[in-house]
Image (cartoon, rainbow, N blue to C red):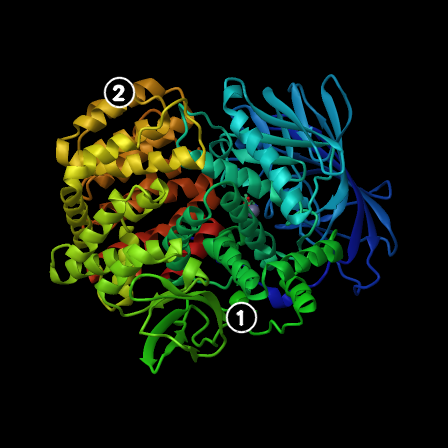
Amino acid sequence: MSQTSAETIYLKDYTPFGWTVEEVHLTFALHPTKTRVKSRIRFVPNPDVPPQEFFLHGENLTLISAAIDGATIPPKITPKGLTADVPVGPFVWESEVEISPETNTALEGLYMSNGMYCTQCEAEGFRKITYYPDRPDVMSTFTVRVEGSEPVLLSNGNKGDAGTGFAEWHDPWPKPAYLFALVAGDLVNHPDNFKTQSGRDVELNIWVRKGDEDKCAFGMQALKASMTWDEEVYGREYDLDIFNIVAVDDFNMGAMENKGLNIFNSSCVLASPETSTDDNFERIEAIIAHEYFHNWTGNRITCRDWFQLCLKEGLTVYRDSQFTSDLRSAPVKRISDVIDLRGRQFREDGGPLAHPVRPESFVEINNFYTATVYEKGAEVIGMLKRLVGDEDYYKALDLYFTRHDGDAATIEDWLNVFEEVTGRNLKRFKRWYSSAGTPRLTVTDKFKDGRYTLTFKQETPPTPGQPQKKPRVIPIAVGLLGPNGDEVQPTTLLEMTKRQQSFSFEGLASKPVASILRDFSAPVVLEHERSNAERAFLLAHDTDPFNKWEAGQALRRASLIASVTTGAAPDTAFLDAVVRVARDDSLDPAFRALVLQPIGQDDLAATLHAQGHTPDPQAIYDASETMAQSLAQELADSLPRLYADTTVDGPFVPDATGAGKRALNGRILYMLTRMDGGAQARAQFKTADNMTLKLAALNALLGQDTGTDEAENFFQLWKGDRLVMDKWFAAQVALAKPEKAADVAEALTAHPLFTPKNPNRFRAVFGALTMNHAGFHHSSGRGYALLADWLIKLDALNPQTTARMCTAFQTFARYDDTRRSLAKAQLTRILSTNDLSRDTTEMVTRILE
Ligand code: 0A1
Ligand code: ZN
């Protein structure tokens, strides 16, 4: 049976902790199964809070001793912590507990990864290390002594005493427990240093397992670039003498911003041209920046409670996307972000897991590290910046940093600084934080006597617990093009505040073509009936790169939907327009690659569903294949020339220019492989000296159901490299034909290198299966059953990753009766598993509701 006692936590129930914590002293005596943790904590009653029972969180701890002001006490142990009678005034709490890092497969708290000790405390992992008020609004300075035989012993803050078998660390900045970290192991470092804008020297290190030293240079460069960028753009300087990054192989998420000691999933920091693709490099750069930026947005100013998670995550994602735009190409970054937003966040917002950017309740907070909190949270900040303008945005941020430094803050605090700086009332805008669901924005237009009028209507479909929606403030960036393609109205921002609203442009000689929602100025679905000729016109002439790309997408989408619903052949307007873009050497290769990129099949299923159809995954797959084949045929004559043009001379440099050309190489090679039986891809596979080109070749072959020899060769070459092996596992499943995908995945689970204990490996196989849309949703139900089998196994080891992977089922209600009942049967089977975790129970329950 699943756990039924899980309690729901509500935002409205927030009450502060009754004490402040003035100092925390921790001593760790490390041992794989018997680590001892001693704590000494000074508590001072908070005069502003009515007296309350003294309660400390604690889970899976063996209490050895507890004392108050030096006198041993018998605390009362509860399933979630302990309570004790405490003095009326300040007191010193001491305790000693025993924990077992080696058997901690949940990867939360203190655990071991390949012989190395590491921690993950966000959101509520610290309570698995010692008894503590484990909540983000309790902040304190920490002094930590680590005792162990490992050569490297790390914790947060600055270095203190160290000697054989021990090291001490002191973090002078008060922090919540979720930012605590400890690492111990036989590690080697890639050192460097940084001088801050005020002239302070900071020691920088990336710590890795022996053998990975040659994969740190890029991460270090990204770290230094991030430190400089945050000084230049936000005026934020680093505040300790040392900044450490550690790479660990077993990690549930991407990385963690622990104060002065960031811990990274090794896949998000280790990079080399031979083993990493351009996408990997860009992601690593962004994640290093993201974690570093948290030092101010998350650490110096943290969250009052976990409902405010978007306060740090939305803002930090927004900041890291600004950083990538500045370092690379802003339009390419924007288009990629929107593809990701539609693929993950719109999907979440349109299904049973929809929740507001600031949720109002949760059972397990780990289930709310979502695309909505992160990516939509960042979009909301982007809209705010558009509405108030750059100057006021940075003024508001300065005020936020000065006023709230050292605080555990709320969304109200965040919006207040904007209201103060701009004099605006943001009450309506705040609905973006409280209302779930993606607004649909319909637009109609009218032209008369030189006046062009756009009328918008907004409507947000109901989401769980929110049947009715109030209108939101929607910033709509619009530009107008004249009949010859010239821009007659440069981008202007319309501020929509009502359910329905019209905006007019005067003095036009003829009816213009409107480019609406430029730069994707709001996270909405734009419904705009227009002719393919208009779309092709925009693809050719729009000066806004996002909308230029979007016009191509609209053409492609319309053609695919027609193919799926009526069996129509790919639309020639689309084929002609895309061929023109592909051949246009004046356009950025990265942009051309994005125009050539297929629309995700899950995204098409969502569109079909929204239009009232029942999506058939196999039909969507067939239409996508036909489209790809037609495009390859249309472009056939140019493919060899285009392919040759993607050659990048000289050694591999993971910058935007080279990456753009290689992205186009991947697209062209994919088409070429359809036409030449794989000859060029085989040649590229043999000669490629970097992973981007090698993997592009392997993918092109696997996509045509060939490449077995290359896959074997790849395996022999890279079987000693964990991260490259993840690519090998994933590629085979992702590119398998629908009817084979589940079999391929199942066979790979029997491979000696497969293990469910490593989240990266588990995700390589099952993440790839769930992203193989027609394979996962195959009418046999094999995809559903296989995933359910493994989720049940994984839940006993690692609830967090299990719960996260359950999201593959969140769209099940879109499909036909057969698929729906097959999926439902698997979800019900998962839910009836004995001792199912709270994490997974919550997710499956919400999906089934
Ligand atoms: N705060 C980190 C991500 C993170 C979140 C939760 C975790 O465990 C539940 C681990 C890491 C970030 O935004 O990068
Ligand atoms: Zn973050």
- Could you tell which of marks 2 and 1 lies nearer the N-terminus? 1
For the C terminus, which image quadrant? bottom left
Q: Residues within 10 Å of mark 1 (few under 14, many from 20)?
A: some
Check whether the beta carbons of the residues at disc 2 and disc 1 lie within 8 A of each other: no
- For residue 48, side relative to residue 416 (left or right): right
Please state which of residues 211 and 819 is positioned toward the viewer in this rendering.
Answer: 211
User: Which residue position is annotated with label 1?
Assistant: 431
Q: Position of residue 282 (x, y in %)?
A: 46, 37
Which is nearer the eye, 709 or 476?
476
Residue 334 shows which numbered tag? Answer: none
At x 65%, y 44%, the residue is 232
Residue 793 drawn at (x, y percent): 38, 40
Q: Residue furthest front?
A: 509
The kind of secondary structure element at disc 1 is helix
Tell which residue pokes out farthest to the bottom in this image: 449
Mark 2 or 1, closer to the camera? 2
Q: Quadrant of residue 735?
A: top left
Q: Amino acid at mark 1?
A: Arg
Q: Is residue 564 above or below residue 836?
A: below
In front here: 540 or 717?
540
Label 2: which residue?
686
